[in-house]
Amino acid sequence: MGKKDALRYRIAPLEMTPTEFRKVGFQLVERIAEFLCSLPDRPVTPNEPPAVIREALGTGPLPQQGTEARDLLEEAADLLFDHSTFNVIRASWR
């Protein structure tokens, strides 16, 4: 099989059964709910300089291999909840 065909017929790393999708989605919703409940105990902003946020995101290349959706969502939630300033530009809400 040629490279073009291999890409066309590959199984995507994020392919999930409906059951797996529901499970991962439920875990993410629970994680968001826990985060929202913790807001009163958190500082308004993490007060981190941009360099710290860039370091947390990493500077390496994108991975060559896929990862489990659950692990990917967990890492993304950690980064967002721990480092986001949740700034919103008002014009974006129009």
Image (spheres, rainbow, N blue to C red):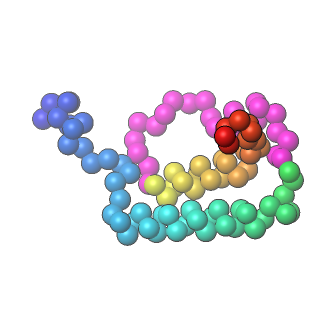
Residue shown at the point (66%, 47%) measured from the top left = 79
Please give the name of the residue rendered at 46% of the width and 69% of the height, measured from the top-left corner.
23
**Which SS type dominates the magenta stretch?**
loop
Residue occupying the point 38% across, 51% down: 14
**In the image, residue 83 above or below residue 74:** above
Q: Residue 43: x and y, percent?
A: 87, 53
Residue 74 belongs to the span the image colors magenta: no
Quadrant location of the C terminus in the rendered image: top right
Using the image as rendered, state which of residue 25 and residue 61 is in the foreground: 25
Compared across the picture, whether 52 is left or right of 92 comes to right
Location of the N terminus by quadrant is: top left
Depth check: give the residue in front, 34 or 55.
Answer: 34
30 over 42 or under it: above or below: below
Residue 48 falls left or right of residue 1: right
Where does residue 51 sit, x and y in percent of width and height? 76, 30
Q: Is residue 53 magenta?
A: yes
Image spot of residue 64 (x, y percent): 41, 36
Residue range in magenta is: 45-68
User: In the rendered image, which quarter is residue 89 located in?
Assistant: top right
Q: Position of residue 35 (x, y in %)?
A: 71, 62
Residue 55 against residue 83 in the figure, above or below: above
**Which residue is at a point 61% across and 68% down the rendered structure image?**
30
